[in-house]
Image (cartoon, rainbow, N blue to C red):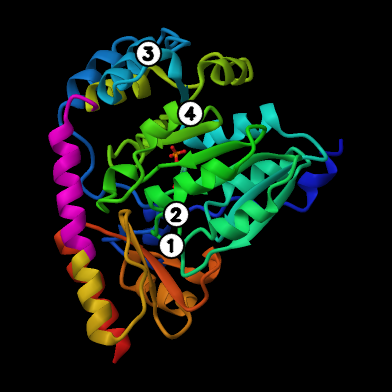
Amino acid sequence: MRVKEQITNLKRYQAGKPIEEVKKELGLTEVIKLASNENPFGCSQLVKEAVLKVSEDLSIYPDSIAAELRHKISELLHIQDEEILIGNGSDEIIQLLCRGILQQGDNCVMATPTFPNYKHNCLIEGAEAREVPLKDGTHDLDKMIKQVDKHTKIIWICNPNNPSGTYVNEKALVSFLEKVPSTSLVVIDEAYVEYASATDFPDSLSLIKRFNNVLLLRTFSKAYGLAALRVGYAIGQPSLLNQIDILRAPFNCGRMGQAVAARAIDDQNFIRETFLKNVKGLNMFYQFCDAHGLHYYPSQTNFILMSMNRSGEQIFQELLHQGIIIRPGERLGFPNYVRITVGTLDQNEKVISCLSKLMK
Ligand SMILES: Cc1ncc(COP(=O)(O)O)c(C=O)c1O
């Protein structure tokens, strides 16, 4: 059996190295993972009860339309339930959008480097991926709009961007959206939105109301600390979401994910604490970079992309032997950089101390 031709050349997604694998490989007992932008503080303690309750109902299929979770999200964000589609992680929504919208002859416009799943899913559908290099680590919207034509079906804006941590501000985004033809969908992926602190960070929920062709992606995997449960969502026009919904597996989001995410929404204190601790952690890394004259991108996320002035792969290997998993920039399109997830205070101190020794 042969798979579609366009799939034969695609590479598998490279996930961060799992902790257990590193322990086994290197004979270490303690390993910390700062490679996948997970929440180092775990998740809200409020969800424990929901976990117990669901564990009594494991023989029952989940609610196919995730009504309770959608309602909790709509209350939180002051939108309508119909404007929300729940996915098995926002990854699944990226896949569904591509599956539902793209075909051969179409194209997608996106930045590079950015989150790899946009291109991956675009190519699977046989569409063209038009990649526009980042400018100073940020989406180059002037160049991106020049790539848009009548065959452009989706424009991807990762805001803040993974792996650079940078953001497009409200003014630049609005001016871009005003130029985009109504036939192109603009997907704004806000996986890290809860970490954004810039005062001119776009108020994307208001943009949804202003521009019919904008769709947002958000997730419970990052600040909410629920990556294991795979819950993400789209916010957009109900007419589009209804059509995309047809493609979705009927029970795409599990009972545990729905119940826990719904309960986690009640604990906005946890999100606020996570945000504040992350700001402190980022400052520790900024200070380290400044002290060593290393370039970095000021981050609106829970990770930092910083230059090492030498092979990031090498730094990755050296830290791995000290029980710290990070991401080498070479694998993310930034040679001689590393991407490090901001950890707990102890974790940050440990990684900074190891890096300081390596700098000598
Ligand atoms: C920018 C971005 N979008 C989407 C995702 C996928 O998140 P989820 O866990 O909701 O599938 C990630 C995960 O790292 C990400 O960095």
Give me the disc on residue 164: 1
Residue 267 coordinates in the image, percent (x, y): 16, 29
Q: Is residue 158 visible?
A: no
User: Looking at numbered disc 3 in the image, what kind of residue is underneath it?
Assistant: Leu
Ligand 1 found in image quarter? top left
State the separation of the CA atoms marked 2 and 1: 6 Å
Q: Is residue 169 above or below residue 203?
A: below
Query: What residue appears at the point 21 percent right and 54 percent down from the top-left corner?
Result: 278
Tell me the magenta residue range.
Answer: 265-282
Of circles 2 and 4, the one toward us is 2
Residue 83: image quadrant is top left
Query: What residue appears at the point 51 percent right and 33 percent down from the top-left corner?
Result: 214
Residue under numbered circle 4: 88
Q: Does the residue at mark 2 contact the one at mark 1 (Cβ under 8 Å)?
A: yes
Residue under numbered circle 3: 58
Residue 297: image quadrant is bottom left
Give me the disc on residue 161: 2
Q: Which image quadrant: the N terminus?
A: top right
| The residue at label 4 has a CB less than 8 Å from ligand 1 | yes
User: Looking at numbered disc 4 in the image, what kind of residue is underneath it?
Assistant: Asn
Query: Dot 2 lies on which element?
Result: loop
Of circles 4 and 1, the one toward us is 1
User: Looking at numbered disc 1 in the image, what kind of residue is underneath it?
Assistant: Ser
| The residue at label 2 has a CB less than 8 Å from ligand 1 | yes
